[in-house]
Every structure is written in C-alpha cells, then in structure tokens.
Image (cartoon, rainbow, N blue to C red):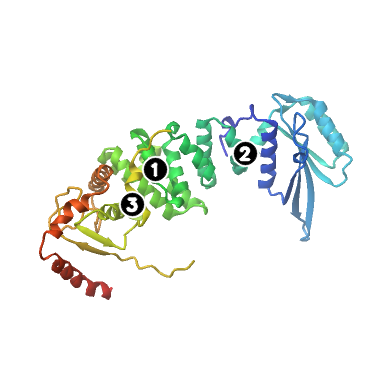
C-alpha cells in the first residue's frame, strides 16, 4: 500500500505484534502451512523466540510440486539489530538440513557490518538461503499485502491514522471495512473528519440495512458533505468498477444515500454542479460521468426511496409493492438522516407497483400540486437536476421533523366523503384491467 510507511507504528510496535504481522504476511504471501512456534510456550524472550515456520509450494518445470520450509525469526528493536543476534540465528539454522530459507525480520535495521558478514557467509554456505528483512523491507511487503497490516497493525494506530489506513485499504484493495472496524469507527464517530471514509463506511455497512442504527451520512457537515458527494460519484464508482469484491449496484445505492444527505446540507446549485461534473471538483479536470448511466439512476433511487417512505404516511398516494424499500427500512427510514448523539431462488420478481392517487388530498409535505401531478417524487424523467435536489431537500427536512402523522391529518378528507368507498372502487376498477394486461 503506497505511502503507508508513516502511518504504521514501526517504532512502537511490540514483539508480539511484530510476530503477528509476520505470521499474517507469510500467509498472504502464499504459504500453504504456517505454524507459530513460539505460541506453545508463550513469548518469553525479548524478541518472542524463534517464531514462525512456514511451508511454501512451488511447481517444478516438470509439473511436480516442491515443498520449501521457511523459518522466520522476529527481532523487535528500537534501533539496529546486533550482529551477534543475527549470527546466533544463522548458526542455529545450519544444523537443519531440510530448511530452504531463513528470514530474520526486524522493525528496525541491520548494520553494514551485519550485511557484510552475511554476504561472505552465504558465499561459503549457500543453503539455506538467509534473508534480512528490515523496516523498509517490511514496509514494501505490507504495501504488497495490505491485508496483513489491516489484520494486525491497524489496532496500534492512532485514530486519525487508523481511519486513513482503512480508507486507503478500501481504495487500493477493494476490501470493505470489517465489523470490528465499523464498530470502532462508530464508537468514535465524533472524531471522523473524512468524507471519503464516511462513504466507504456507508458502503461497508450497507449489507446490514441498519442505517437507522448507524446513520453514517448524518455525520456529515457542510465541508465533509461536499467531499463525500464528490467521492460517492467518483472514487466509490471507480473502486466498484475495478474490484470484483465490490458492486456497482451497491455503490449506486450508497451514492443515493450520500447524495440525499448532501441535498440537505449544501446549496442546490452546488449539488447539481457536482453531480454533473464531479471530477472537476476532485482533480480540477472535467471528466463528466454519464448522466444517464449513473447520475439519473442515483436520483431515481432517492426519489423512489422517498416515495416509499413518505408515501407510507400519505393519504394522497398509496404504492404497492414499494418501489425501493420496504418493511423495517420504511419504518425507520427518516432516522438515517438524523445526526446521532456524538459518543434461495425465489423466481423473477415483478418490478411493477400499483400507485393509487386521490388528487383531492393535498401533498403531506406541502407541495402545491395540480390534479395532473400525483407526487413530486414520482417523476418519469429528470430534466433539471437542481430542481430534483431542491425537492429531495424539502422532503427530507420536512420528514425529519414530521416522520409520521400526516396520513391521519389528511386522511379525514376520505373519511368525511360519503362516496369514499365508491371512489376507491372506481379508481381500482379502472386500473386493474390495464394492470393485468401488462
């Protein structure tokens, strides 16, 4: 992972943590067997004892498989490893006839004297191969196998460094944040200052459908909202397109969540300009995304979610089945925008929904609608992005303050009409033949 050297705690790493890193590294380097030799007796010496034995397999030119045994010895040091410590490991390994390679690894460095001695030793004793891994080599291996550091060293980082490392890990490896990383970040949410990380956390948490419990986008403020919106429509999409471990559809849904919150925090014209050309804000160079391929689907997703959530408490319209969300998601939908206290084969689904409209009843949010317009959230097309942004903002802000009660408020229009049952029957009767023909 390029550029992570200053973010990893090489100076403060403990002997046990160094061993954990080396164990994880050889596993990610392809070892088919890894044994932690010091674990049986516990770590009792300054460097944890001779630590790890690993088996690597290589295919020979004739198709056979050759097994190689490696020893990895950890030397946790504040500075330079003494030459005598290296000589002891080398001399001990000389008696092992089946060893292919011996690694002496340190978070510190090896002296020139040690390098010169080992060079001469290896000329006379070519087997087993002896290698020295200093802090720079370990950093290069971590860059090549970032999952090893994510599994071990991340817990030793300061909060800001840990957040930055996890963010880079997501971008450069296509790996979502683990449940423990999400728990840790949420517990320390008041300290998060990265809009990009919030986008990545929202993506990682999306599968749990628990935005009402951890409303990541609600942590955004004005400055972070712009950053998050830009990355939701650039970095996140690029990662999802590049890594097989990520999903474009999920990225679209997460971008919808981030975009909806940004509509409430930023001027509508700024949101519209970002959506039309997000790369201009990211790199200062226009590289406009396809409005039809991504931006419109994101906006339609927002409108569909809002229609489901707002329509569930609206006497003017009724949508069945829901367009985008249902069940507990509808019940808790508006909470995803509220800032929390700081501290098997089911067959092909029918994508159609029946929408019943009573144009006599006013919009629950307060939009002045002509009888020809059923709901501002049920658009057939998007022409002016800025107008859609203003609509999203108005609906969310109203519903955060009034998440329910609007059906009871306006539903009396139906109940007080003596022809209510007849009206409903007429509407449904007119729609069902057309519905069944589709």
Can you tell which of label 1 and label 3 is closer to the viewer? 3
Query: In the figure, 340 relative to 245: above or below?
Result: above
List x then y, in percent, for residue 209. 42, 51
SS at badge 2: helix
Q: Are marks 2 and 3 in contact (CB under 8 Å)?
A: no
Judging depth in this view, the residue of 36 and 3 nearest the camera is: 36
Give the percent coordinates (x, y) of residue 40.
Answer: 77, 41
Nearest to the eye among marks 2 and 3: give it: 3
Q: Which residue is mark 3?
A: 331
**First along the sequence among labels 1 and 2:** 2
Please say if 228 is above or below 306.
above
Earlier in the chain: of badge 1 and badge 3, it is 1
Q: CA distance from mark 1 to mark 3?
A: 15 Å
Left or right: residue 358 compared with residue 13? left
Q: Confirm whether residue 288 shows in the render.
A: no
Q: Quadrant of the N terminus?
A: top right
- Callout 1 touching callout 3 (CB < 8 Å): no
The residue carrying mark 2 is 152
| Residue at mark 1 to residue at mark 2: CA–CA distance | 28 Å
Outermost residue to the left = 418
Describe residue 297's horizontal placement relative to residue 73 as left or right.
Answer: left
Residue at the far top in the pictured view: 79
Numbered circle sitting on residue 215: 1
Picture quarter with the C terminus = bottom left
């Amino acid at each position: 992972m390029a550029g992570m050297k200053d973010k990893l705690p090489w100076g403060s790493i403990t002997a046990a943590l160094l061993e954990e890193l080396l164990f994880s590294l050889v596993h990610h380097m392809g070892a088919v067997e890894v044994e932690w030799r010091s674990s049986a007796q516990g770590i009792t010496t300054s460097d944890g004892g001779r630590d790890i034995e690993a088996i690597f397999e290589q295919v020979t030119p004739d198709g056979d498989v050759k097994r190689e045994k490696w020893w990895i010895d950890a030397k946790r040091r504040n500075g330079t490893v003494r030459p005598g410590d290296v000589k002891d490991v080398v001399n001990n390994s000389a008696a092992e006839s089946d060893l292919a390679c011996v690694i002496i690894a340190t978070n510190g460095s090896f002296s020139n004297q040690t390098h010169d001695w080992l060079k001469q030793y290896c000329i006379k004793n070519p087997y087993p191969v002896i290698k020295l891994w200093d802090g720079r080599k370990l950093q290069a291996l971590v860059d090549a196998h970032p999952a090893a550091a994510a599994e071990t060293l991340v817990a030793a980082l300061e909060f800001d460094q840990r957040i930055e490392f996890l963010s880079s890990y997501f971008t450069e490896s296509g790996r979502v944040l683990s449940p423990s990383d999400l728990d840790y970040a949420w517990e320390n949410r008041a300290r998060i200052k990265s809009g990009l990380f919030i986008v990545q956390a929202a993506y990682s948490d999306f599968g749990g459908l628990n935005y009402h419990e951890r409303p990541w986008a609600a942590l955004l403020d004005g400055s972070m909202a712009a950053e998050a919106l830009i990355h939701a429509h650039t970095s996140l999409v690029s990662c999802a397109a590049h890594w097989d471990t990520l999903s474009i559809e999920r990225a679209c849904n997460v971008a919808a969540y981030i975009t909806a919150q940004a509509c409430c925090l930023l001027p509508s014209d700024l949101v519209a300009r970002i959506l039309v050309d997000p790369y201009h804000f990211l790199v200062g160079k226009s590289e406009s995304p396809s409005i039809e391929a991504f931006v419109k689907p994101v906006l339609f997703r927002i409108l569909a979610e809002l229609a489901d959530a707002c329509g569930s408490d609206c006497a003017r319209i009724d949508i069945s089945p829901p367009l985008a969300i249902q069940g507990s998601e509808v019940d808790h939908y508006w909470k995803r925008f509220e800032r929390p206290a700081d501290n098997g084969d089911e067959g092909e689904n029918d994508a159609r929904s029946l929408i019943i409209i009573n144009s006599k009843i006013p919009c629950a949010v307060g939009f002045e609608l002509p009888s020809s317009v059923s709901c501002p959230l049920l658009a057939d097309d998007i022409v002016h992005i800025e107008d859609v942004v203003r609509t999203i903002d108005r609906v969310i802000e109203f519903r955060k303050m009034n998440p329910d009660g609007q059906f009871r408020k306006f539903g009396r229009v139906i109940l007080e009409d003596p022809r209510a049952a007849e009206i409903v029957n007429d509407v449904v009767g007119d729609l069902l033949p057309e519905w069944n023909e589709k």
